[in-house]
Amino acid sequence: MSRGRRTVRTAARPPLPAVLLVVGGLLALTAGCRPQPSEPAASPASGTAPSSASAPAGPMARSAPATPTSAAALEALVVTGVPSGLPRMPDTALSPPAGEKSLDDVAAYASDQAEERRVLRDYGFRYGWERFWGTGTMPVTSVFVEQFSAPAGAAAFSADLAGNDAAHYRAVLHEDPAGFPGGCRLLTVARPQPDVGLPGPAAFAWCAHGDFSVAVTSVAGSADAARAEVAALVEEQLARLPG
C-alpha cells in the first residue's frame, strides 16, 4: 500500500470517488532495506549545539530549534502554510486522519503490518506528523515529517520511500536534484498513468535531515508548478528543523 492513499471526508462537497490523495508512498519495507550497523550516518546527530566558530554572531543570531522530545513538540516545527496559498485541510477531513503519527499508525499503511513495525523499530522511528493543504483531490500539497533516534534510520527510511514510489509511479528518481538541498530525492510525474492513482501531474521530494525524514508532495495543474511548490516547501521545512 502506498502511504497517503486516502479519501477525503467533507460535508461541504459530495463524497470523492476512489481517486485518492497521494503523498510520499509507503510500500512494504523489506529486510534488505534496513540500515546496517556499519552504515555511516547521513549527517551529524541532531541536537548538537553549533560550535562558536560556525554559529552566527551579533544581535541577529538565531538559536537552533531544540530537538523534539514528543510528537507535540514535533508538530510545532511543521510548516503551517504552503507557497501556493492552498487552504489547510483539517486533519479529520482525511481517512485515516492526518496529524500525529505513531509507529503503529505508520505501520498500518503497509500490507504486512507486523513486519513493518519490526522494520520501523530497527530504523529507530520515534514519531511523525502529517499535514495537508487543498480542497479536494487536486491541487493538493502535503508534508510528512518523521523523527528517528539517529540520522542513519532517517536516511534509510527516506531512501526506502523514494525508491518505493519511483517503482510504483514508474518514473525516474533524481538524487540531489538542482534547486534542492543535498540529501534530497525528487520524482516528477507529468502524465500519470491511469492505474497509479494520481489525479494529475505531481512532484515528490524526500529529504533526510539529521534525525528527520521529510516528504513533500504536490499534485497540481502541471509538473513544473508541482515541482516549484515542493522545492520552496522543502527549503522552508528543513530550515525549521534542528540538525
Image (cartoon, helix red, strand yellow):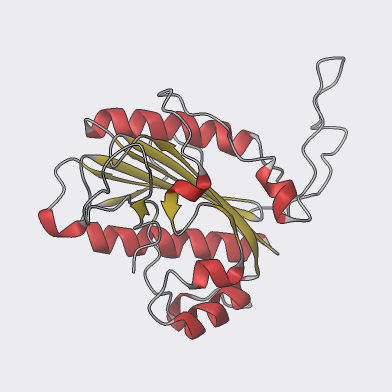
- All told, the count of numbered labels is 0
Q: Is residue 137 above or below residue 153?
A: above
- Residue sitting farthest toward the top: 59
Task: Classify the position of the N terminus by image quarter.
Answer: bottom left
| Residue 56 percent location from the top left of the image | 80, 24
| Residue 126 percent location from the top left of the image | 67, 64
Q: Quadrant of residue 119?
A: bottom right
Q: Quadrant of residue 178?
A: top left
Residue appearing at x 42%, y 61% in the figure: 161
Residue 56 horizontal side relative to residue 34, left or right: right
Residue appearing at x 40%, y 54% in the figure: 24
Residue 137 appears anywhere in the view: yes
- Residue sitting farthest toward the left: 194
Residue appearing at x 63%, y 78% in the figure: 37
Residue 203 horizontal side relative to residue 75, left or right: left
- Residue sitting farthest toward the front: 11
Residue 183 appears anywhere in the view: no
| Residue 177 percent location from the top left of the image | 38, 40
Q: Nearer the viewer, residue 48 or 104?
A: 104
| Residue 62 percent location from the top left of the image | 80, 25
Residue 116 horizontal side relative to residue 111, left or right: right
Q: Is residue 117 above or below residue 219?
A: below
Residue appearing at x 71%, y 43% in the figure: 242
